[in-house]
Image (cartoon, grey):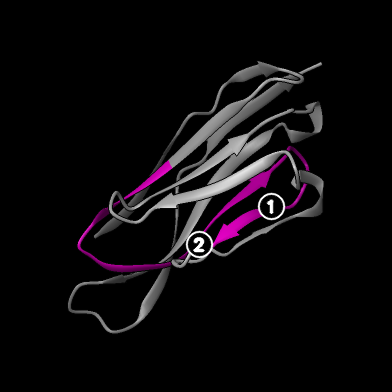
Amino acid sequence: QVRLVESGGALVQAGGSLRLSCAAYGTIASINLMGWYRQAPGKQRELVATITSGGTTNYVDSVKGRFTISRDNAKKTVYLQMNSLKPEDTAVYYCNAGITQRRITSESTYWGQGTQVTVSS
């Protein structure tokens, strides 16, 4: 059994910063790609950033230069440092990971429960 647990969402003023965390728990053999997605009210879920097990990162254009994704493989945790937040960053943020469980050969995709980020103007 594997689960992803997110934390760090909050209400913050425009221009402020937040750091989201997402830790993976369970019988985990390896974690491949990890990422953050977000979904604003009335909109589709969109990719925010991803990071490979080797540390290669990718960002959606709207957050480049403001957000930084990182991971601690030993802690099985991915982070999203969000700076210079804007009201349009308001959304539920979800973490996502490709995980292979022990004694299982195939990788599966897992999602966290989501954490609310609200940026006031």
Residue visible at 58% across and 27% down in the picture: 18
Depth order, front residue of 66/85: 66
Name the element at disc 2.
Answer: loop
Q: Is residue 30 magenta?
A: yes
Which image quadrant for residue 100?
A: bottom left
Residue visible at 30% across and 69% down in the picture: 30
Looking at the image, is 108 positioned above or below residue 85?
Answer: below
Quarter containing the C terminus: top right
Name the element at disc 1.
Answer: loop
Quarter containing the N terminus: bottom left
- Residue located beneath label 1 in the image: 45
Give x and y (percent) for residue 83.
Answer: 68, 30
Depth order, front residue of 111/59: 59
User: Which mark is on residue 55?
Assistant: 2
Q: Magenta span: helix, strand or loop, mainly?
A: strand
Residue visible at 20% across and 62% down in the picture: 27
Looking at the image, is 52 positioned above or below residue 15?
Answer: below
